[in-house]
Image: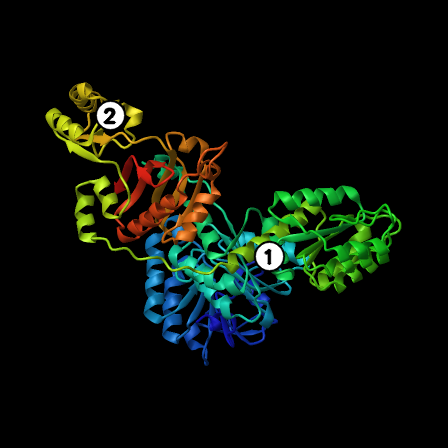
Amino acid sequence: MLKGLFEPEVVAVIGATPKEGKVGNTILRNLKDFNGKVYAVNPKYSEVLGFKCYPSVESIPERVDLAIVAVPLKSVLNVLESCGRKGVKNVVVITAGFKEVGNYDLEKELVKICKRYGINLVGPNCLGIINTHNNLNATFSRVSPPKGRIALVSQSGALILALMDWARLNGIGFSKVVSLGNKAVLNENDFMEFFLEDEHTDVVMLYLEGIEDGRRFMKVARRLSKVKPVVAIKSGKTDAGAKAASSHTGSLAGSYEACKTAFKQSGVVEANSIEELFDCSLVLLSVGDFNGEVAIVTNSGGPGVMASDAVEFFGLKLAKFESRTIEGLKSILPPIANLYNPVDVLGDADAERFGEALKVVAEDENVGAIVAILTPTAQIDFIKSAEYVSSIKKPIVTCFMGGESVKGAVELLKKRGIVNFTDPVRAVKALSFAYKYGLMRSKEEEMHEEMDVDTELVRSLIKERAWFEVLKAYGIPVPPYGIARTAEEALEIADKIGYPVAMKIVSPEVIHKTDVGCVKLNVGRDEVIPTFYELVKRAEDFLNVEVDGVMVQKMMPMGKEVIIGMKRDPNFGPLLMFGLGGIYVEVFKDVSFRIAPISRSMALEMVKEVKAYKLLKGVRGEKPSDVQSVVDVLVRVSKMSMDFEEILEMDLNPVFVYEKGCCVVDVKMVVR
């Protein structure tokens, strides 16, 4: 669909001008080396910078594949109409002044024109696009990046300018560069789909401030990440709106948590800084993925120890060498050298000793990747060492530490596609991204089980705010209970279900009942009637809320307390939460997240990710709790959240987990 955008034969620059410093002038200059035809469009001129100039795009005597629009704001809609009549299917609007400054109606008109004529539009308010493989630089950047295998898609044009300048200085190339701008028509999902088939792109790099259509993003990213690594950095991570959420889940599950979870589930590797974005992308381009078993070969003990610490810290493992590897190292290294991982060839080692050690280690089948560390001793020849590194057929990154003395070697490594770091910790961290990518990519998409649920019954129960009945309809265990409208009813219910009981006010206006004194526990028979009046009086007189009744509930034996929750994210849909339960959930924040629907294995992953999992497994002689019963509830909540979009937030807290089974003791829901 977007081939004409990146591989046009004829390009028109609308708003071209001979005036230096103007956007239309810079774009035209950048297109001088383009492998195709370029026309200028401006009614004031017959020629601009040697390009033939026409008064309008419609007056160009041949088909136009791509139009770059850099005209004043008031002229954009007319120009777009002209492009539509001409049959131009790909347009980049550089001009700003649309929804980013509150001009929503103007942008809506822009979108209407694009829909009417079937136009693929990039922008507005963007830097433009680049395809280095046909010298298409349709941006107002002063520099063009070198050719490479990384595609860069960014919501910030200014950031692209900085990244391209930095990449050029460091010899890093791009295949495509896309400035998304306001994403009025085309967004990150469209470009990820294009990169699936792009033969010039091996890694996709994303800078995102927001995500359009989160469900589609996950679907496309999952497909793309199976064949090409996707590395993303997400800005705007704080979520002040979460402070106003009604449930525990709502307060913990901000929009960034949804985005972070979506990345994880769809195989996108998340970077947390520009440095990480490049480190991760370059290592994935060079190394791909590996088994997480790392070998370190160094001529200096200190950096070797730093790298070893980093291996454990970032979730990798030091490879355990085979006996033949130890013997091989013993035959080439001095007696005082360290033969075990990390391998220290000693400070007096020359390039040959270092290179031979690398070869022996690389032949070990347990080793997935190598970190080769060198410091500038008098004996070491960095160029020769780089040649040895280049001959290794196993994934490898280097840490040639130094300045001027390592410059030539680093350039050689760069040409051979090997990434060098100046810090051993940074090198290991970059490798850890490759390992995580491999784990995510290897996961198969699982089928989500169906359940036999009377959805019409549940819909009516939701309208009645009968939350426990909703849970029962989905097969989720709850205590025996009843709703009393009078004190006498409360006594009848309590007599029926047995003592002691818990009594809780029922009111749509009271979400956290414990916080406002609207819960009484371990109530005996003689206390039921006075407790009923006490709760109602407190709710009506002190809190001034409407009361629907009092819930009388069987007191359940204590189990391990966990929380299961859901918050509906506007982009990604139901965000499920699991964690340590009780009133301190927001204090300890020991929680994990997934986006529904989830399978049983995904639910089990959620449980295992939290620190509270150790409590569920049993500590100090305790018998383990029934984790599978928790998994079952998570899967059922997932199904419920997919079935009913009107449920916005949900807390099952606490859920008591026993040796056999579990029970939801309290539930809160917020519905549309």
| Element under disc 2 | loop
Amino acid at circle 2? Pro
Q: Quadrant of the C terminus?
A: top left
Query: Closest to the observer: 299 or 625?
Result: 625
Residue sitting at x 47%, y 53%? 263
Image position, residue 112 (x, y; %): 32, 63
Q: Marks 1 and 2, how far apart in space?
A: 61 Å
Mark number, residue 571: none
Query: Which quarter of the figure has residue 109?
Result: bottom left
Tell me where residue 461 appears, x and y as whole percent.
Answer: 18, 45
Query: Callout 1, which amino acid?
Result: Ser
In the rendered view, would you say 624 is above or below 513?
A: below
Q: Position of residue 39 (x, y in %)?
A: 51, 74
User: In this figure, which residue is indicated by the disc labeled 1?
Assistant: 281
**Furthest-bottom residue in view?**
61
The percent position of residue 196, horizontal first and vertical second, equals 50, 67
Q: Nearer the viewer, mark 1 or mark 2?
A: 2
